[in-house]
Image: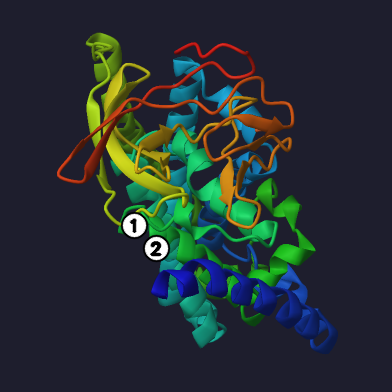
């Protein structure tokens, strides 16, 4: 019940508030949509916060959006270990940039009296939600590695199901709490949209991404009277650059440690082990269930905990079948439609029966089954992946 509120009702409510609240505010107080209302870039602290923040968040949002729009492309991009390295490293670096940006922006609002004076209660709520989101994302990057690869099999099908008005929360509900928090908090931020300075997104001030910070001459004269012109600025400027540069270099080195370790002593590509999926006693005959689980995996020559999911089907005779969740056409995640009693792939319309046979669409073979065993009603599977787009079931 609570899951239904968090992962179905709340996302739609947040979207409703964002659209209708945004339209109402635009009509009632159109001038507040301008980014200048947030005093964007009126001083250095804002520059050092705003630029890393905007660069980081725009690229991270893009990386979240592309798999929703074109999952097969994203899956293809992650098939090579080298490309996975790139995405993992880029994600961690952008996460750090965004974290740095949001903390500078928060610090500025706390310590700069002018900025503090124009910060509303809702702005603080928004900053807290953004900081929480970035921190959770950063945590996920480090403790659930290869997020850009498994995201496409977990949150993406859930988000696509919301967009198609056919919500399937079973993709997201079994995930660890921090991932669930990250998902719900994203909709909190969307819901806050019309009530905060987030509305400036609509005015898309891209020029701020390359425009240098500006100095208010009156402000400069009054604050720096008695000092040789520019001396205080350049000293502080140098200090700020040194701090940010050092922080970036240190964090970059920390991020590189596991990758360097992987290059020096790559983890052996060992044989697939059994992974514990969960209790299957509640699965009803003819009612397929998506089950998510964590497994130790070796990808791109590194050990890590990966999130996986499978479809479990109990046939009327009580016999079990475990399907890989990956569509054999081009690798999207398919879902079960209880209305039609079929598995359906949203990408190109392949349809499969409850036993996995192809009923329609471009899928070249039936759904791929996975080896499994059961002990005391607990299901264990051997996770395997297969080539997509060909009639034969060939293990990768
Ligand atoms: Fe094309 Fe599933 S990926 S139908």
Q: Nearer the viewer, residue 172 or 203?
A: 172
Q: Is residue 227 visible?
A: no
* Farthest-out residue, bottom: 28
Q: Residue at x 65, y 60 (%)?
A: 166
Q: Nearer the viewer, residue 231 or 357?
A: 357
Q: Residue at x 69, y 45 (%)?
A: 210
Left of 306 or right of it: where is 64?
A: right
Proximity of marks 2 and 1: CB atoms separated by less than 8 Å: yes
In the picture provided, is 85 more to the left or to the right than 162? left
The quarter of the image that holds ligand 1 is top right
Check disc 1 and report the residue beneath it. 178
Percent of width and height locating residue 185: 47, 66
Q: Residue at x 39, y 63 (%)?
A: 181
- Is 275 left or right of 188, judged from the image as shown? left
Query: Which residue does the image show at 47% across and 78% down from the upper left?
Result: 125
Q: State whether residue 35 is above or below residue 156.
A: below
Judged from the image, the secondary structure of the residue bearing numbered disc 2 is helix
Quadrant in the picture for the C terminus: top left
| Mark 2 neighbour class, 10 Å CA radius: few under 14, some 14 to 19, many 20 or more | some
């Amino acid at each position: 019940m609570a899951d239904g509120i968090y992962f179905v009702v709340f996302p739609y409510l947040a979207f409703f508030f964002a659209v209708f609240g945004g339209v109402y505010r635009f009509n009632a107080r159109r001038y507040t949509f301008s980014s200048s209302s947030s005093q964007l870039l009126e001083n250095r602290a804002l520059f050092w916060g705003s630029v890393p923040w905007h660069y980081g968040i725009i690229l991270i949002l893009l990386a979240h959006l592309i798999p929703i729009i074109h999952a097969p492309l994203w899956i293809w991009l992650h098939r090579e270990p080298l490309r996975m390295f790139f995405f993992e490293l880029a994600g961690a670096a952008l996460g750090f940039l965004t974290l740095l940006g949001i903390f500078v922006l928060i610090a500025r609002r706390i310590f700069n009296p002018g900025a503090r004076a124009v910060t509303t209660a809702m702005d603080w709520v928004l900053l807290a939600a953004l900081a929480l989101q970035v921190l959770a994302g950063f945590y996920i990057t480090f403790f659930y590695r290869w997020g850009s690869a498994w995201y496409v099999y977990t949150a993406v099908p859930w988000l696509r199901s919301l967009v198609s008005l056919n919500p399937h929360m079973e993709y997201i509900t079994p995930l660890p709490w921090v991932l669930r928090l990250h998902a719900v908090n994203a909709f909190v931020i969307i819901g806050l949209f019309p009530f905060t300075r987030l509305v400036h997104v609509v005015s898309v001030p891209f020029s701020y991404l390359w425009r240098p910070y500006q100095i208010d001459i009156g402000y400069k004269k009054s604050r720096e009277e008695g000092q040789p012109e520019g001396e205080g600025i350049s000293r502080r400027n140098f200090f700020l650059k040194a701090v940010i540069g050092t922080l970036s270099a240190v964090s970059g080195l920390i991020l590189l440690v596991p990758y360097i370790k992987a290059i020096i002593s790559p983890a052996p590509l060992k044989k697939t082990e059994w992974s514990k999926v969960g209790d299957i006693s509640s699965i009803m005959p003819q009612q397929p269930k998506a089950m998510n689980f964590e497994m130790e995996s070796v990808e791109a020559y590194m050990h890590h905990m990966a999130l996986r999911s499978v479809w479990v089907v109990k046939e009327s005779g009580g016999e079990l079948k475990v399907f890989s969740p990956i569509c054999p056409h081009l690798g999207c995640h398919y879902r079960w439609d209880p209305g039609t009693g079929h598995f359906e792939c949203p990408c190109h319309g392949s349809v499969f029966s409850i036993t996995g046979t192809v009923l329609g669409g471009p899928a070249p073979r039936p759904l791929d089954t996975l080896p499994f065993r059961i002990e005391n009603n607990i299901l264990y599977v051997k996770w395997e992946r297969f080539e997509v787009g060909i009639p034969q079931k060939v293990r990768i």
